[in-house]
Structure formats: C-alpha cells, structure tokens
Image (cartoon, rainbow, N blue to C red):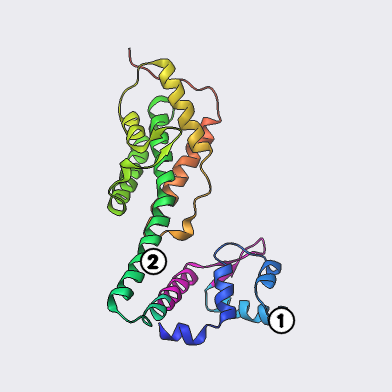
Amino acid sequence: MAAYRVRISETVLTILNECRKPKRFSELSRAVNVSETALLKNLGRLMEKGLIKKTKDGYYILTEEGEKVLEKIEIFNLIEKVVKEISVEEIRANILLSLRRKVKDRVMVLVPLYRALLCTRIICRYVEGLEKYLDEVNYLTGVIEEYLLSLFPKLFDHFYDSGISLRDLKKLSEEYIDDVDRLDRLLTYAENTISNIKEVKLEVLTESEKKIAKEAIQIIEQIKKELCTPPRVFETEP
C-alpha cells in the first residue's frame, strides 16, 4: 500500500482518475497540467504496468488492475486523512461514512437493473416465443434481489417508478393477469422500462457484482431485440 503512495504522483493519479471513463489523448492533455511529451511517457508507463489500456478507437481507459490500484490509493488517502483526527471514534465514523456512500452508489445502480429484470420476467411470461428465457431471468432476478436485500433490507419500502413500487412490480411479475386491458398496460410499461434503461455504471460495482450485472444486461438486451420482431401475441389461459 505504501509503495503505491510513494510511486504515484499527482499527475499519474489525475490520469488514473480521468481514465475511469474512456478518454482521448486530447481530453487527458486538457485535464493534466503537463506537456504532451510527459503525458505520453506517463501513459506508456501506465500501460506497461497494466493499469490502463488503449482501445481500438483511440480511447484510454482503466484496466481491472488499474481500478483495483486506484481503489487502494483512495482508501489509503482516506485513512491517512482521518488518522490526523484526534479520536478513534472520529476515524471510525469517517471510514463508515465512506463505506456507506459506496454501498449507496452500488444500490442505485443495481435497483434499476432489478426493476428491468422484473419487467423482463413479465414480458417472458406473456409474450409468445420468449418463455424460453424465463428460467434464466428468474435466476438472475432472484440473485440480484437477495443481494440487494443484504445491502438494503428496506428495499421494498422505497423506490417508485411511474407510481409503481418495487414491491408491487414484483407481485405483478408473479401473479397471473387475465384482464386483457390491464395486461396490455402492464406490458407497455414493462417494454418501456427495459427500452429506456440507462447505461449501467459498472465502474462503481465490485467484481462479483459486475459479473452478475453483465449477465442481466445481456439477457435484457437479447429480449429487447426479439421484441422488435413482430408479431407480438399474448398468451392467456382459458
């Protein structure tokens, strides 16, 4: 840990932070107060160490190892900052506050994904040809739900979208609906939800969270593609 602090300058730290998202050389040059030659040298060294990579499109971005190193630096800097305080209680409070913020960021990324999976479950139950995905969607929904509840036990008491709570949406995804008009409105809501889901900020998630999130995104995207292929037929029981 100490080695990272000694070897990483403010310039390199700025580069690493900027590369949390894909950046072109020109963008990095504006953000870092060094010459282009010095910037190129720093980028070369960071790529050699496997902390950043350059994409085919010419963007620089952190590697998984780079994310881990940057996280260690941030934790070290946080500890270094708070240990200057007088009491142990103050140190503990600062660290816990930082951890709570990280958990909140992760929850706010995972909840929309969970909502989209609930909507995907509804679609798979009623749209002909998509029932083949139902087992996988149920599995991913269950995994993310259990994990979210471990992070945020009051999950179902919060989070509304268009007046529909997560609790109500989960119930709707599990019960049988025989009212055609009600079903049509629900399917419209479900389709709009998965089509409007924003880009998931995977960078705030842990590695295990990223893995399951990527699987969820993949199945949602596959179902979105199939929904674009008409006709759509609702299956109802006699």
Q: Is residue 145 visible?
A: yes
Three-letter amino acid code at the position of disc 2:
Ser
Percent of width and height locating residue 85: 36, 80
**What residue is pinned by disc 2?**
98
Q: Nearer the viewer, residue 44 or 151?
A: 151
- In the visual, does 11 lie left or right of 217? right
Percent of width and height locating residue 136: 36, 40
Residue at coordinates 31% horizontally, 47% vertically from top-left?
A: 143
Q: Quadrant of the C terminus?
A: top left
Three-letter amino acid code at the position of disc 1:
Thr
- In the visual, does 238 lie left or right of 105? left
Query: Does the magenta-highlighted stretch encompass residue 71?
Result: yes
Q: Is residue 102 above or below residue 107?
A: below
Instruction: Say few, some or many: other residues with alpha carbon within 10 Å of mark 2 (under 14 / 14 to 19 / 20 or more).
Output: few
**What residue is pinned by disc 1?**
37
- In the visual, does 32 lie left or right of 128? right
Query: Does the magenta-highlighted stretch encompass residue 135?
Result: no
Write down the region rendered in magenta. 52-77
Query: Marks 2 and 1, how far apart in space?
Result: 36 Å
Q: Is residue 41 above or below residue 102?
A: below
Instruction: Say few, some or many: other residues with alpha carbon within 10 Å of mark 1 (under 14 / 14 to 19 / 20 or more).
Output: few
Q: Nearer the viewer, residue 105 or 52?
A: 105
Q: Residue furthest top?
A: 238
Residue at coordinates 45% horizontally, 26% vertically from top-left?
A: 187
Residue at coordinates 68% horizontally, 69% vertically from top-left?
A: 25
Percent of width and height locating residue 26: 71, 68
